[in-house]
Amino acid sequence: MTNEVMVDVRGLVKRYGSFTAVNGVTYSVHKGEIFGLLGPNGAGKTTTIEMLVGLRKPDEGTAVLAGYDVRKEVNGVKEVIGVQLQSTSLFELLKVEEILHLYASFYPRHVNIDELIEEMLLTEKRRDRIKGLSGGQKQRLAIALALIHDPEIVFLDEPTTGLDPQARRTLWDIVLRLKERGKTVILSTHYMDEAHVLCDRIGIMDQGELIALDTPGNLVKMLQSTSTIEFYLNDPPEEGWFMKMDGVKEAALKDTFVQLYTDDLQQALTSLIEVSSQHGLEIRDLQTRQATLEDVFIHMTGRRLRES
């Protein structure tokens, strides 16, 4: 990663009637960086990406990609970006290598297709029709199509949604290899583990706004707590009640689900058990874990990233 800015976004706004889907988003991405947009479905991640790649026109704000203005220099932008959208419609009856050659013909220059097929782990499927591919194989093919012209900036919009754990891990390896090759990657996701593993920096989006921006480690440190205690209570008291316990730095409450954040796990657990016993509260399904990006989101919004 270098200090060269490849993506410079300033005050992007997108409205649909009275609804504001993206509200004044500002950030920059450096060359060779994996930048994550993390947030729940409907947060504005996809709309932001669609404005950057020219699929939607911003109502306000500016964006410059590798020196090209997305409003004024659309053709220049198309030359330097590769895009894998959340839902990609492919020609189902074509074979894998056929569609790659077709896409390659759209550009004045392209990468070696045999090498790209191998890199995307599609060698055994190169002569298979697209309709017979698994979900993970189709996603890898979609990324291959985005890379066919060797773009400088790669947009991946929720690339692992709906995939099984093994297919997700395979795609993670592919994304990390893009970084090794010096590509700049903008990745949207609502998977906190994915963002933590892949991204150099993360912008957390909620209700169309960028509410936090930093490295994964620094975002977790924002909580000023290293551990989380989770449990259920049939009739929990207010959040402030839990704050009186020893070692508890913050509490989050949703219906009967309680989360306590602490730097001293043993002290907080001891206090929780003592106080609950004194007041006749029945704790269910108690577990402890290290603090995560999901905790950051709960801390900032009072809601979970993915509502069950």
Image: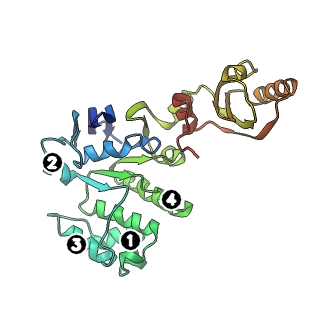
How far apart are the two marked residues, 3 and 4, measured between alpha carbons? Answer: 27 Å
Q: Between tags 3 and 1, which lies in front? A: 3
- Numbered label attached to residue 118: 1
Task: Give the mark, 3 or 1, whose residue is nearer the N terminus.
Answer: 3
Residue 34 x, y percent position in the rendering? 39, 45
How far apart are the two marked residues, 1 and 2, measured between alpha carbons? Answer: 31 Å
What residue is rendered at 44% in x and 44% in y?
A: 199
Question: Which is nearer the eye, 240 or 18?
Answer: 18
Q: On the image, numbered disc 3 is attached to which residue?
A: 102
How far apart are the two marked residues, 3 and 1, measured between alpha carbons? Answer: 18 Å
Question: Which is nearer the eye, 162 or 63?
Answer: 162
Q: Counting other residues with Cα less than 10 Å from the Cα at mark 2, is it few (<14), some (14-19), or many (20 or more)?
A: few
The type of residue carrying mark 3 is Leu
Residue 304 vertical placement versus 147 (above, below): above
Q: Between tags 1 and 4, which lies in front? A: 4
Quarter of image, res 212: top left
Q: On the image, numbered disc 4 is attached to which residue?
A: 168
Viewer can see residue 26: no
At numbered mark 2, what does the secondary structure look like: helix, strand or loop? Answer: helix
Quarter of image, res 280: top right
Pointers 1 and 2 in contact (CB under 8 A)? no
Task: Give the mark, 3 or 2, whose residue is nearer the N terminus.
Answer: 2
Q: On the image, numbered disc 2 is attached to which residue?
A: 74
The type of residue carrying mark 4 is Arg
Quadrant including the N terminus: top left
Q: Between tags 1 and 2, which lies in front? A: 2
Pointers 3 and 2 in contact (CB under 8 A)? no
The type of residue carrying mark 2 is Val
Left or right, 82 with reference to 178: left
How far apart are the two marked residues, 1 and 4, measured between alpha carbons? Answer: 18 Å
